Image (cartoon, grey):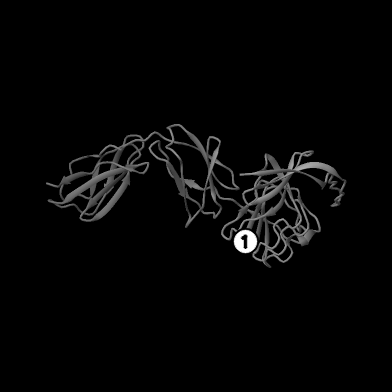
Amino acid sequence: MKRILSVVLVVVLTLALAAGAVVFAPMQVRVQAAQSGDFTFSIETKTSSATILGYTGSVNKGPVYIPENLGGFPVVIIAPYAFANHTELRSVIIPEKVGLMGPASFSGCSNLNSVYFLGAAPVLINNPNVFLNCAPSITIFYIQGKTAFPNPWYGFDPVLELLITPKTSTVTDKMNTISGTSESDWPVAVTVGMVKYKASVVSKKWKVTLPKKLAAGTKFTVCTELGDATSLTAMRFVLPATPTVNKIKPNSYYVKGTATKGATVYVKITLKNYSAKASAKTGAFSVKTTKIFKGNVVYVYSKINGVFSELKEIIVK
């Protein structure tokens, strides 16, 4: 629930960025102050922008995401002392349009060791004091393909962050979850239509639960919070057919037959499992096994899109 107040503040109206200089032209303007989640902010109506004034959160795991927009306006300024002395902060992500950070805005964040900028290098008022008394190992990151930081930058040596696109398991119209793996620790974002769902990566795995099953043909995107999105489509659910198995002769080493095209065929003999991929064109398969004897019981089944077929039982004669 947002609480909106109208107040009159003296704010910075003009920022002249020339040769590293910042020039202030103060005047009275009408703004709105508000609270949204963990963030206190104001809106400067003349420039249609938002300023982060304070932070009331207490997150001590994973990065803190400063919103791209507050009150319907892009966040462009982080005010002096906005995040000061939040010792629980470990990692912060600065949105793309932030162009100005006030004195001591992150001072005293003694455990803050990584700051990720999504946009161009902002101007730091009172430069290094912005990160005064943060973790000694604090590192400034910028994102591949998004921007380039000068090096050094206010005494810091910015590091290029390479982002890895997460892998996604096949999604069908019988599922209301989307899952996969990722080599990056960055949270994964899944966007369906206009709605974005987020998932944390735990042991290189992630999973998003949707409010309802996706219709076949529904398009969605998957990306890390900061990376380029991969466009995917929900597939129609296909129950794989029970494999058709050719006659198995005693003393042979292969189980052959046909199955759903592209399915993985599994063969189980005396508690041991063997598998092979069925042809994507014909569905033919040939699974190499241990030596098969007369009287052996052979179980054959297949899997595609995470769904198993019925089990076929064969007694070798």
Q: Where residue 113 appears, x then y in whole percent?
A: 65, 62
Category of crowding for the residue at label 1, using alpha-carbon neighbours closer than 10 angstroms: few (below 14), some (14–19), many (at least 20)? many
Exactly how many numbered labels are in the figure? 1
- From this view, report whether residue 63 is shown above or below residue 70: below
Label 1 sits on what residue type?
Arg
Front residue of this view, candidates 292 and 124:
124
Q: Where residue 72 appears, x then y in whole percent?
A: 67, 39
Please indicate whether residue 32 sits to the left or right of residue 317 in the image.
right
Please indicate whether residue 16 sits to the left or right of residue 36 in the image.
right
Q: Where residue 62 appears, x then y in whole percent?
A: 57, 57
Q: Residue at position x 70%, y 42% from top?
A: 74
Front residue of this view, candidates 185 and 84:
84
Element type at marker 1?
Answer: loop
Front residue of this view, candidates 57 and 267:
57
Q: Where residue 271 appears, x then y in whole percent?
A: 23, 56
* Quarter of the figure with residue 45: top right
Quarter of the image for the N terminus: give it.
top right
Front residue of this view, candidates 8 and 178:
8
- From this view, report whether residue 12 is shown above or below residue 63: above
Residue identifier under label 1 = 90
Please indicate whether residue 307 sits to the left or right of residue 61 in the image.
left
